[in-house]
Amino acid sequence: MGRLRPELLPKGRIWPLMVAAPVALFFLSFAIGRYPIGAGTQVLLSMGPAKPKATDASLADELQEQLGIPVIVVDASMENVEETYAFLGRILGREERAAALAAYCRAALDDVRRKVSAIPEEKRVRVYYAEGPDGLSTEPESSAHAAVLKFAGAKNVADVKLVPGSGMSPVSLEQVLHWDPEVIIAWEDLRGGAHAMIGNNPDWAGIRAVKDGRVYAMPNTPFSWMDRPPSVNRFLGLQWVAHLFYPEVYDVDIRAVTREFYDLFYSVKLTDAQIDDLLKNAVSAPDRPKTGR
């Protein structure tokens, strides 16, 4: 299998590692998403024979007309993962591999949902998802971008109108102060997020999550662990937030889970240092790397 050209990859901590692995197919949807249709067609065609994937039927029709090659629409919902992988396995001629990946995803989703289902409503963690560079965009519970939080048993505090498609409902700091979440999940700084700002800005200091030191950065390598794009990384993110919110209920070694996931899905064997880097702002004290590693 060929490798995707490095200049098409997003900038980030782990790309020298990821580029060295034969995982080009996993990056196609991200590379496509970085370009408007008019400009992206030449980039796509330069990749050679491929089956670009899209998540919107109208976009797929437009791309197919411009490219002159098949464009495939797949169901990105977490609950239909088996059907999606079975479909991709058939068209790519990788049924056995697809079945193994689907089995992992289904087991992770079912395990988390089963364990958190017993948590009483009053004990569910109240969480705010801080998107964008100022942390003042978010997703309501009904948003597909917040599905990981819902499946992990969190209580999403964002009482806002859903923005269809791309999401990112605008909110004010006054609203966040009023909601007073116990936990804040923010985009990490490498993604242009607000993680460091939220923890250091006095305007946010009165929020319970900030006072308690429970502002976490969502890992974003090679893709977001929660939403954009709606990739398989959500099934790792699901286990991450379930353990983060309810460590006694979802008692796993998140470092081992992360190591297994990257090996299975990306054929990458992470070192301890690389796992430290991924999780350094994403976990609570018991899961942080020991000094001197």
Image: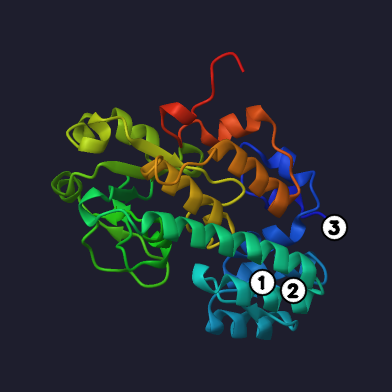
Provide residue 188's location: percent of width, then percent of height. 46, 40
Provide residue 117's location: percent of width, then percent of height. 36, 59
Viewer-nearest of discs 3 and 2: 2
* Distance between the alpha carbons at the discs numbered 2 and 1: 6 Å
The residue positioned farthest toward the front in the image shown:
118
Q: In this view, does 271 lie to the left or right of 285?
A: right
The residue positioned farthest toward the top in the image shown:
292
Mark before the other along the chain sequence, 3 or 2: 3
- Type of amino acid under label 1: Tyr
* Distance between the alpha carbons at the discs numbered 3 and 2: 18 Å
Mark 1 lies on a secondary structure that is helix
Provide residue 165's location: percent of width, then percent of height. 42, 71
**Toward the viewer: 189 or 145?**
145
- Residue at (78, 74) in percent of width and height: 92
Q: Is residue 157 above or below residue 287?
A: below
Viewer-nearest of discs 1 and 3: 1
- Residue at (39, 38) in percent of width and height: 216
- Residue at (26, 37) in percent of width and height: 209
Q: Can residue 156 be seen in this view?
A: yes
**Toward the viewer: 220 or 41?**
220
Q: Can residue 228 be seen in this view?
A: no
Q: Residue 85 carries which label?
A: 1
- Type of amino acid under label 3: Gly
Mark 2 lies on a secondary structure that is helix
- Type of amino acid under label 2: Gly
Q: Is residue 165 above or below residue 278?
A: below
Circles 2 and 1, Cβ within 8 Å, touching? The answer is yes
Q: Is residue 58 above or below residue 171?
A: below
Neighbours of disc 2 within 10 Å: few (<14), some (14-19), many (20+): some
Q: Look at mark 3 in the image and give the residue it sits on.
A: 2
Q: Which mark is residue 89?
A: 2
